[in-house]
Image (cartoon, rainbow, N blue to C red):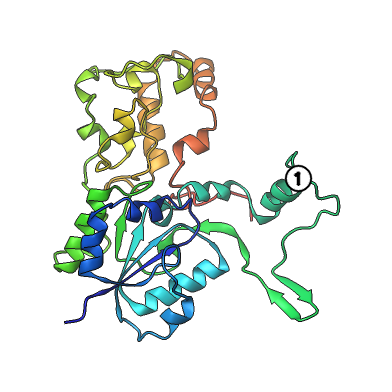
């Protein structure tokens, strides 16, 4: 009996989700034994034309990581969608837009101006920017288009399941593969992780006082962090109240506050708004001036609230830009 065909593809991301597959270590041998990997450009010599030659629906599942930023990514994921029975959004960038999604605070024109002209280390006196088409002696060279707006995977193609995290942990990946291979999947559209918040599983939850009060906000490098005490109670912004559990609390155990890479729970539509609401409820100020001072002390407010989820939020991008 032929083994189910599996594909992996990398869009706009750091590559950590590809590493999460390699980080299965010896368990990757069990994966290779159970499935036939038919497309994995980062690790194996397959081309898109190999996928194009496959019958539609012949791939059991495609794991796609990264946000959609370029035209070639949109074309590739639409091809994989047509060839696949299931598509799993693998990691924060495919799930919510991730760190690349913070580019939605700008547009293509301003990003190109910054990267190719304004950065102090750039030497580009002619102000040459990347072009979609370049005329060469051999003909016109077409390059992928750089979009104005970063999109999540499900804003481009239909997605069946979501593996959250930056990057998804090993146990969640193996559990997802097992569920797919045994046809024991939850309803379509499910996030393959627990439904509770990180605060519910946080090893410091017993240290959290009945009423946490924020009088000032600190950054991790400004204080000696108590490794046993709730971060919020130490004045440090922790995204735990607005973030899904299932990560294994690795950041917490490393004495770093949660940054929210697992995204919101099923009950929350907008992770940034939820975190803002949670922080506002902890403010202990007596007038508007004090409230403004406390709010101003948060460095990069939009990046803090929407570090992994701006494209998936109700905002999607900065208003008035493109």
CA neighbours of label 1 inside 10 A, class few (<14), some (14 to 19), many (20+): few
The answer to whether residue 1 is above or below residue 20 is below
Viewer-closest of 127 and 209 = 127
> Where residue 160 appears, x then y in whole percent?
30, 66
Q: Residue at x 39, y 50 (%)?
A: 92
x, y percent for residue 102: 53, 46
- Give the residue drawn at x 23%, y 30%: 202
Which quadrant is the C terminus positioned in?
A: bottom right
Name the side, left or right, on which 102 lies relative to 247.
right
Q: Is residue 318 visible?
A: no
Tell me the residue that label 1 is attached to: 122
Residue ID at (24%, 43%): 246
Residue 296 seen in the current view = yes
Q: Give the image quarter of residue 223.
A: top left
Task: Say which quarter of the image contains residue 229.
Answer: top left
Q: Position of residue 173 (x, y in %)?
A: 26, 55
The one nearer the camera, 163 or 108, is 163
Kind of element beneath mark 1: loop
- On the image, which quarter does residue 209 sit in? top left
**Label total for image:** 1
């Amino acid at each position: 009996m032929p083994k189910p065909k599996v594909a992996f593809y990398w869009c706009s991301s750091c590559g950590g989700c590809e590493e999460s597959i390699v980080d299965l270590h010896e368990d990757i041998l069990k994966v290779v034994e159970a499935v036939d990997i038919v497309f994995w450009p980062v690790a194996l010599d397959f081309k898109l034309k190999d996928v194009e030659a496959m019958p539609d629906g012949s791939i059991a599942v495609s794991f796609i990581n990264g946000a959609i930023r370029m035209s070639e990514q949109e074309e590739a994921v639409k091809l994989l969608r047509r060839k696949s029975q299931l598509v799993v959004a693998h990691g924060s960038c495919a799930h919510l837009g991730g760190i690349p999604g913070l580019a939605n605070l700008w547009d293509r024109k301003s990003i190109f101006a910054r990267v190719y002209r304004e950065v102090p280390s750039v030497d580009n006196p002619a102000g040459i920017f990347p072009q979609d088409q370049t005329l060469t002696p051999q003909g016109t060279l077409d390059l992928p288009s750089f979009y104005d707006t970063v999109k999540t995977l499900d804003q481009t193609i239909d997605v069946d399941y979501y593996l959250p995290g930056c990057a998804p942990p090993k146990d969640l990946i193996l559990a997802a593969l097992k569920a797919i291979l045994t046809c024991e999947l939850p309803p379509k559209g499910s996030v393959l992780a627990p439904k509770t918040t990180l605060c519910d599983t946080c090893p410091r939850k017993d240290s959290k006082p009945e009423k946490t009060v924020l009088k000032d906000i600190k950054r991790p490098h400004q204080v000696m962090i108590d490794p046993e005490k709730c971060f919020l109670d130490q004045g440090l912004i922790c995204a735990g109240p607005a973030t899904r559990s299932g990560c294994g609390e690795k950041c917490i155990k490393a004495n770093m506050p949660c940054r929210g890479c697992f995204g919101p729970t099923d009950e929350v539509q907008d992770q940034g708004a939820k975190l803002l609401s949670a922080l506002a409820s902890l403010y202990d100020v007596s007038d508007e001036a004090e409230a403004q001072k406390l709010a101003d002390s948060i460095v990069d407010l939009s990046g803090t609230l929407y570090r992994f989820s701006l494209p998936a939020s109700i905002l999607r991008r900065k208003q008035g830009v493109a």
